[in-house]
Each structure stands twice: as C-alpha cells, then as structure tokens.
Amino acid sequence: MLWLPIFQITANALNPFHKIFKEPCNRTNIPADYKVFTFMIKSNRVPSQNTAFVWFRNDLRVQDQTSLFKAVNSHYRVAGVYCFDRRLTEPGRYGFPKLGSYRRKFLIESLESLKNNLQDLGIPLLLLNGSAQNVLPKAIERLNVNSVFFQEEWTQEESDEIEILKKAFPEIQWHSTYDQFLFHPEDINIPVPEVPEVFTAFRKKVEKKVDVRSSVLPEKKQTDPLHLIDLQDITIDISTIKTNEPPDSRSAFPFKGGEDEALSRLEEYFWKTDGLSRYKYTRNGLIGTEYSSKFSSWLALGCISPITIYHEVKRYEKERIKNQSTYWLVFELIWRDYFKYVSLKHGNKIFMKKGIRDEEKTWRQDEKVIQSWIDGKTADSFINANMIELKKTGWMSNRGRQNIASYFVHNLGQDWRIGAAYFEAMLVDYDVHSNYGNWMYVAGVGNDPRRRVFNTRSQAERYDTNGEFQNRWLQEVLL
Ligand SMILES: Cc1cc2nc3c(=O)[nH]c(=O)nc-3n(C[C@H](O)[C@H](O)[C@H](O)COP(=O)(O)OP(=O)(O)OC[C@H]3O[C@@H](n4cnc5c(N)ncnc54)[C@H](O)[C@@H]3O)c2cc1C
C-alpha cells in the first residue's frame, strides 16, 4: 500500500479538524524529498520496504506536524515513539524536578490524546520507558527502523542526546525539522548570529516581511501493521505514570492536555466567547479562564502549533472582526518566537548567571528567603497570592509572573536561575526558551536594555483593585 503525498488539504468529513482547515492549504516550501516521492507515485514505482519512527518530544500533535507528515509520505510503516525519562521527575540542581506533577499530568493527558489521534491515522504510539539514548536504540533495532523523523531541538541536553544516537546509528536516516516556530528559520532571512537583541527590531524584520507557512495534515491511512513484538521490556503502560493532582476550584486553568483539548480551546476562545476580539484589554487579568488565551501549555508541548493558531486568527479576522486585539495575539506569538531565536543565537548562555548580556551581578542564594517566596510568605500580599496560585495549580498569569520574578530578583536579590528552575518544576506551560528568556529579561541579564523594577504595590492596586485576586488565594493564610 502506498502513502500518498498531500500538498493540499481541504475540509472534509473525515477530517476532525475541518473547522480549522476551511481553506486549501498551499505548501509553498515543499522539501526536495517530497518531490522525489511524487515522482515515485506517478511512475508506479514502489519504494523499498521501509519503516520510520516519528520520535515525538515537544510536538505532541498530528495536525501541522511536519515530521509525521514527512514520515507518512515517504515510508510504508510508521510508528510514533515517545521516551519517558523518569529522571526528570527527580530533584535537579536546585532541588526541584524538571518535570513537576502539574506538567506531568498535562503531559500524560497529551500523550493519551496523541495516541488516539495517531490511531485514527492507523499509526501506533510506543511509549518507551527510559531516556532516548537508552531505549530508542533497542526499539530501532528490533523493529528494523531505517528512518527517524523528529523536531529539531537545540538546547544542550537535547542536542547531546541526538548526537549520541546519530553516532550509534550512522546508517539510519535522521530527519529533523524546526517545527515549533511561527516564522520558520529558513524563511526569516536573518542569519542566527544576527538575530537582533531587541524584540521590536526583530518583530519589524519578520511580521510584515515573512509569510507564515501553511499547515500540513497527513491523510488517514491503513498502515501495514507493524509487529510490536518483543518490546514489553522497554515500553511502559501509561496508567503507571499517571499523577493525580486534585483540581483546585479557584484555578484559572482547568484545562486538560492534548491536541483535541487545544483545538477546542481555540474554538471556544475565538468563536464561542469571542475572547480574541477583546484580548488586548483583558490580557493583564488575574482571574478566570477568559482573560487570556491559555494556549501556552498546549504550545509548550506542541499539542497545537503557532501556525495553526495564526491561520485561525486570520480566518477570524476575515469572517468576524479584525481589531487591535486580534493583532495583539499574534504579537505575543512573535514574542514566543523571539525567545526561541534568542536561545538559538546564544545557546547555553541563557542558563548562565550572567545571562546573554554577560552582566556581572551579585545574586544571593538564601534558602529561607527563597522558601518564603515559594510558600507565599513574603511581606507582599500580591506576591504571596500569585505564588500560592502557582503552588496549588501549576499556573500563574503573565501579570503575576512579571511581578513575582521582579520581586524575587530585585526586592529579594536572589539568583534568578533558582526562580527559573522553580518555574520549570511548577509551570504547566513550562517552555525552556520562554521561561529562561523571560527570567533573564526581568533580571536585567537578557534582552531588556532597561532595568525595569516592578512596584508590586502599585501593580496590585492597578490590576487587583478590589483585592479579589488576593482574597481568593490568601483566604486560608488569613483564617
Ligand atoms: C518570569 C516569566 C516566566 C515565563 N515562563 C514561561 C514559560 O515557561 N512558558 C511560556 O509559555 N510562557 C512563559 N512566560 C510568558 C507568559 O507569561 C506566558 O506565555 C503567558 O502568561 C501564557 O498565558 P496565555 O497562553 O494565556 O497567554 P496569552 O496572553 O494568551 O498569549 C498568547 C501566547 O503568546 C505567547 N506569549 C505571551 N506572552 C509571552 C511572553 N512574555 N513570552 C513568550 N511568549 C509569550 C504564549 O505562547 C501565549 O500562549 C513567562 C513569563 C515570565 C515573566
């Protein structure tokens, strides 16, 4: 059976995402290997028997998933793999795990959703038990895999991992794609070393000058069944790694992980509540589901792509309303891209005390002070309310994050990397580039040329005028 390449996607009854794909999808940048494959189909030549893995990491979706798209268009048999490395749940450098329980719950829900969506395409998802470098080789050998498709990641641990695997399997074809950007690195016409150090300069170079690519979607196919034999010793049953975080009724973020949930949130925030049309004026809110899009957690794990969101904004602008708010959501997505380009440019510097500015500053690491910040027991009730929200839900608003980070580094004088590591453990939407980029920015070692210190008291008066947010989270403390 052949995988047929699709370069145009139109809405159809089989497509669960038909609402998103109302318009034909013209892929302008078709990689050379697609063209070769088209030739093979036209000439009725059958490609040699082959099996590919799509190695999922922070790209847990089937829609607009370039690795998946390429794999199914060029291989007979395709399986998805995800490596669950339990070491991430153990305490790290500053005592916090990299994968805390909120994100772990969200991740597992996202994997369950991915498994179902892949199943609809006839593709199994193997959940491997261990780090990629330990378990992927075994799966590759046993299933006789000859190609692995994956999203390019460039932070140290991820790129070390891939280098080890490539060395172990030089005969395997490793196909990586940048699939987490709004503006693709090949399209922006800015060599990475020349990425501007100031956001506005970057935005001006891309927002009106670079086309956002179209989404891609693999067609539903019957695969030759892949014999998933002999894998029991390296796979893991998803139910054994589930966590049970009881939901807090005060949460601003009662959402579940997974692609379907991401798409229904998109539908809800844009089309049902018209939240998008008011976004610019509500985005600094602190309470409830609607003040901002809440897309970040799904974006962080790649349950939805920024490209999908972008095209839906454009459709909304055409079919409903185009205003400053619709623009502003895209503006914020450009910030997200920007921090990815900053980390591409500066590499490991984003994790260093001096940051990307090489700024020598004195930071303290006072355990008691840090613990009181974590527990919401500082002298500032606005900070405390935000920190308790984070502890109880894994979520904090953007306004809250700006304030608590500023307070941590400027008022308490603590090492910004510890704040960032705590966020990494706690935030359901943790994203390495956005997190370290924003922390450096607030700490004055990143892309902000000015030293901005938040006056948390006046911020509270402005954004929590009647104290509703503080009452909400400080009730238990005050009783
Ligand atoms: C100290 C600090 C740490 C942060 N850590 C993270 C993190 O780990 N992961 C993360 O996704 N965001 C992080 N942010 C950025 C921002 O707070 C969140 O993206 C935003 O609050 C998520 O809510 P939302 O999806 O409702 O955003 P909306 O306001 O609806 O914005 C839409 C999208 O734009 C992007 N975006 C918005 N603001 C920013 C920003 N300042 N930087 C980068 N992207 C942005 C996000 O992808 C977001 O989902 C951090 C901000 C600070 C100040």
Image: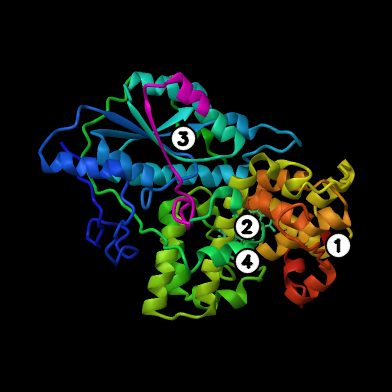
Q: Do the residues under discs 1 and 3 have CB atoms within 8 angstroms? A: no
| Circle number at residue 380 | 1
* First of labels 3, 4 by sequence position: 4
Q: Residue at x 32, y 42 (%)?
A: 70
Q: Give the structural element (helix, strand or loop) at label 1.
A: loop
- Among the 4 quarters of the image, the one containing residue 474: bottom right
Camera-nearest residue between 377 and 323: 323
Q: Nearer the viewer, mark 4 or mark 2?
A: 2
Q: Residue at x 79, y 49 (%)?
A: 374
Q: Residue at x 67, y 37 (%)?
A: 97
Bounds of the magenta segment: 163-188
| Circle number at residue 238 | 3
Using a 10 Å C-alpha cutoff, classify the residue at mark 3 as few (fewer than 14 neighbours), some (14 to 19) or many (20 or more). some
* Cα distance between the residues tagged 2 and 3: 43 Å
Q: Residue at x 46, y 80 (%)?
A: 322
Camera-nearest residue between 433 and 282: 433
* First of labels 1, 2 by sequence position: 2
* Display colour scheme: rainbow
284 relative position to 228: left or right: right
145 relative position to 302: left or right: left
Q: Amino acid at mark 3?
A: Ile
User: In which quadrant of this rendering is ligand 1 seen?
Assistant: bottom right
* Cα distance between the residues tagged 1 and 2: 36 Å
| Circle number at residue 200 | 4
Say if the magenta span includes residue 38: no
Using a 10 Å C-alpha cutoff, classify the residue at mark 2 as few (fewer than 14 neighbours), some (14 to 19) or many (20 or more). some
Coordinates of residue 59 in the picture (x, y in percent): 45, 45
Q: Amino acid at mark 1?
A: Asp
